Amino acid sequence: MNIESKIPNISKHLKNDYDYFEPNELSKKGLCVPQIMLDYGKIQNKIKSIPRIGRYMAGSINQLNKSYNSLYNQPKNSLTTISDKDLNDLKDYCKTLDILDIGFCKVDPSYIFSNRKILFDKALVFSMAMKRDIIKTAPSKPVEKEIMFTYYKLNVAVNLIKDFLYDRGYKAQAGPALGGEVNYPLLAQSAGMGAIGKHGLLITPSHGPSIRLAAVYTDIENLPINEINKHLWIKDFCERCNRCVKKCPANAIFENTQILSDGTKKHIDYKKCALPFSTQYGCTVCVKECTFFINSYDKIKKSYLK
Ligand code: SF4
Ligand code: SF4
């Protein structure tokens, strides 16, 4: 069965005569999680979760459609330079939406999924934290609910942020947390918000990998684009740690991150991950067991530097 074709996709909403940004030869196809669960896991177990998480899934699909439907309602005579006041107001607004951190970057075309496109090549990247006390119980039903709830809240947030930018006269496209067009860990790493760990997730200074990510794309030219990433030492730390590799119940995390023939990296065997992911409430053991979830960033960095 082809579930992928039934999931909303931006390609159906893009007008041919519009200038958009496309993937390149290094881009990878975005993972379709329900399809992977169907092909390699036990999707019937996930279906049993619907009474628990169905409303958040439906809400997220709603937000995805909202994002697509507003693609061409962009403000007329839009601004491409953002004022300090608007940027500060935006940051304050994000706090009211429970956004944890904001990063800014130019989108590398290789980060765009090979079957997707975006309207603008600058990104505001947003993280939202999942509740620590709940994630500690992984794998569990409350964790599965927390993940879907965070996705939903973040999907709502990026649409509201897009509306905020529209109202102030800027063009924008909401990139939802679930069903997005771009590889978010790579985007957030490029925005300097953290570094990708051995488990393939973004490790952040304040919450380790216990976050979800989304983005808003825009043509604003003077965003405070990140130039350096001060968290990349984490990659070297991961080489000595390997805790997630040992704790993963499916041996799905590669001890030696695979370097593919085109030079891109593969951290996880998704076919192996699919079984615990579908039968154990989204698993999430790699988040709970990550050294950066258990210990503080500053403490780990101090001992690493020794
Ligand atoms: S979700 Fe579970 S099975 Fe998948 S990589 Fe993480 S720990 Fe391994
Ligand atoms: S558990 Fe260790 S090896 Fe795995 S991502 Fe976290 S820090 Fe890196």
Image (tube, helix red, strand yellow):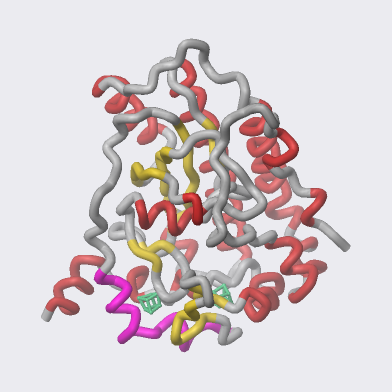
Q: Is residue 103 above or below residue 146?
A: above
The range drawn in magenta is 233-249
Q: Would you say residue 98 is visible in this rendering? A: no
Main secondary structure of the magenta stretch: helix
Q: Would you say residue 243 is visible in this rendering? A: yes
Which image quadrant is residue 49 in?
A: bottom right
The location of residue 11, given as percent across then percent down, is 70, 41
Which image quadrant is residue 282 in?
A: bottom right
Left or right? Give the position of 58 relative to 211: right
Tag count in the figure?
Answer: 0
Q: Is residue 239 magenta?
A: yes
Q: In what quadrant of the picture does the C terminus appear?
A: bottom left
Residue farthest along the right direction in this orientation: 1
Which image quadrant is residue 232 in?
A: bottom left
Which residue corresponds to the image point at 48% horizontal and 74% vertical from the top-left? Answer: 286
Q: Nearer the viewer, residue 56 or 119?
A: 119
